[in-house]
Amino acid sequence: MAGATRNQGRDLTIQEMARRSGFSEPTLRYYEKIGLLGAVERDESSGHRRYTPAIVERVEALSCLRSAGMAVSGMRRYLELLSRGDAAAAEQRDLFASQAQKLAADIEQLRLRLTYLRRKADLWDARVRGDLAAEQQAVEDVVRVMDRFMLKD
């Protein structure tokens, strides 16, 4: 309902929907084609897509899911479970918990990459300063991070 309130009951064009959701126009067309959005109404005179408040709300939900890293298959599963209401609450919980675990693993991988880049910057900073002891320490730190990369594979 919040989407409908913000939309003030007015249908949106595909350009407005793209700006609002962060999805490109081709992505919106694709999501419609594969059934994530359901039927998007068309303007009778122009044939252009018109996103009703209900579709706007659905697109906003999908935008949040994608921002959280969920794949199209997960979005589809979410919508299927949503249509079942509270009867699918446990499955919804599991879907979101699984996505949270995936995101946590992605964050850990990003932290490792960040550490690697910082240690490499330290190495080059030590070299710029001519500090051999700091350079040696930085090399050791870089090797430790690289070893952690190898353990991830």
Image (cartoon, helix red, strand yellow):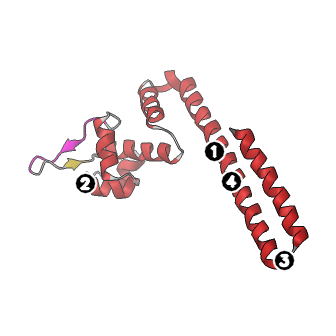
The magenta region covers 38-45
Q: Residues within 10 Å of mark 4 (few under 14, many from 20)?
A: some
First reached walking from the N terminus: tag 2 or tag 4: 2
Q: Residue at x 77, y 73 (%)?
A: 125
Please identify, in this view, whether the residue under mark 3 or under mark 4 is nearer the observer: 3
Q: Position of residue 79 (x, y in %)?
A: 42, 32
Query: Quick one: which residue is furthest to the top in this view?
Result: 87
Q: Is residue 44 on the magenta stretch?
A: yes
First reached walking from the N terminus: tag 3 or tag 4: 4
Are circles 3 and 4 on residues that touch, CB within 8 Å?
no
Q: Residues within 10 Å of mark 1 (few under 14, many from 20)?
A: few
Figure check: 91 above or below 64:
above
Residue under label 2: 13
Describe the element under mark 1 as helix, strand or loop. Answer: helix
Figure check: 69 above or below 128:
above
Describe the element under mark 3 as helix, strand or loop. Answer: loop
Residue 90 as seen in the image, left or right of residue 30 = right
Figure check: 31 above or below 139:
above
Residue toward you, 149 or 53: 149
Residue toward you, 52 or 104: 104
Question: In terms of image quadrants, where is residue 106?
Answer: top right
Question: In terms of image quadrants, where is residue 58?
Answer: top left
Query: Which numbered disc covers residue 113?
Result: 4
Describe the element under mark 2 as helix, strand or loop. Answer: loop
Q: Which secondary structure class fits the magenta region best?
A: loop
Describe the element under mark 4 as helix, strand or loop. Answer: helix
Q: Amino acid at mark 4?
A: Arg
Query: Which numbered disc covers residue 33?
Result: none
Question: In terms of image quadrants, where is residue 149?
Answer: top right
Q: CA distance from mark 2 to mark 1?
A: 35 Å
Residue under label 3: 130
